[in-house]
Image (cartoon, rainbow, N blue to C red):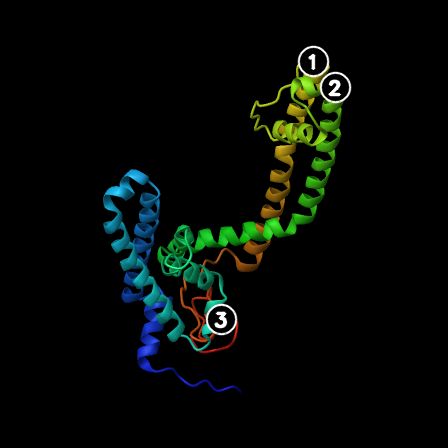
Amino acid sequence: MKEYKPQSKWKNKLHEVIYEADTPSGKLFDIVLFILIIISVILVMLESVDEFDQHYHKTLLTLEWVVTIFFTLEYIARLISIKKPWKYVFSFYGIIDFLSTIPLYLSYILAGSQVLLAVRAFRLLRIFRILKLVKFMGEASQLQSALKASRAKIVVFIYVVLILSVIMGTLMYLIEGDEAGFTSIPRSIYWTIVTLTTVGYGDIAPQTNLGQLLATVIMILGYGIIAVPTGIVTAEFTRNKKGNEASNKGTVHLNTQACPSCSAEGHRDDATHCYNCGHPL
């Protein structure tokens, strides 16, 4: 059996604070982090307002540096506190954390790179772990499974819609012509898609009676088309939910422990070892 060398106490404590929310210190860290993320996103928004930026540019820049330095130290601490740093680096949150940390540094090298600071909004997803909304995370997982299960049907449906758009667009081009704004088949297809999806920009409109009749048919088809993918996903979502309830009997696990070795999350409440790599928790 594989033996695991225990990490030093300070690394274990650091891992507990940063990666877990079951302890008071871990919860406090996550709340502070959450507040800083919100502040950072607000700063990015304010910087985009020219009048505000002109008056408070130095203040905004100073605050942005404070937040960036904190995120930099946090990123380094996350790398130090786990045995396999690359697992975190290439994870979803690892990539988001990296992208949300480097823009301000890059702004001194590449012009306009500070726009990437808006990526920090993705870090707000940590609220699910902070507030222990595991039930909602479970629902999101079921929705993802439903989308995957129904993707073949949705692809076929989209293919049919595209064919229908090409046919209807071509007919509108033949009926209306250049005078009504249908100057080409691609432009007519664009109008068909806009009408079919019930967006209706109004930049092009049929003028003849026959064209308006065809437009009416396309509008009615649009309502039915919107309902089809919704029905497909809903059916798969219901099927998956029933399957999960039958297998898990409605159990919701609130464990926020992350594996010190591979950073895997989502362990059972009574878990003593990581389900992914077997490392002791």
Classify mark 3: residues with Cα within 10 Å, few (<14), some (14-19) or many (20+): some
Q: Quadrant of the C terminus?
A: bottom left
**Residue labelled with disc 1:** 208
**Residue nearest the viewer, comparing 177 with 36:** 177
Task: Point out which mark residue 87 bears.
Answer: 3
Relative side of 255 to 51, left or right: right
Name the element at disc 3: helix
Location of residue 134 with respect to 255 vertically, above or below = above
Q: Residue at x 41, y 64 (%)?
A: 255
Marks 3, 2: nearer the viewer:
2
Query: Which kind of residue does numbered mark 3 sit on?
Result: Lys
**Residue nearest the viewer, comparing 16 with 78:** 78
Whole-percent x, y for residue 64 in the image? 30, 55
Q: Quadrant of residue 175?
A: top right
Residue 264 appears in the picture as rendered = no
Name the element at disc 2: helix
Relative side of 154 to 93, left or right: right
Whole-percent x, y for residue 221 in the image? 67, 27
Q: Residue at x 58, y 23 (%)?
A: 203
Residue 271 appears in the picture as rendered = yes
* Sequence-first disc among 1 and 3: 3
Query: Which kind of residue does numbered mark 2 sit on?
Result: Ile
Name the element at disc 1: loop
Q: Residue at x 56, y 26 (%)?
A: 201
Task: Point out which mark residue 236 bears.
Answer: none
Query: Which kind of residue does numbered mark 1 sit on?
Result: Thr
Location of residue 10 with respect to 55 vertically, above or below = below
Classify mark 1: residues with Cα within 10 Å, few (<14), some (14-19) or many (20+): few
Label pair 2/1, CB-CB below 8 angstroms: yes
Task: Point out which mark residue 175 bears.
Answer: 2
Location of residue 51 with respect to 16 vertically, above or below = above
* Sequence-first disc among 3 and 2: 3
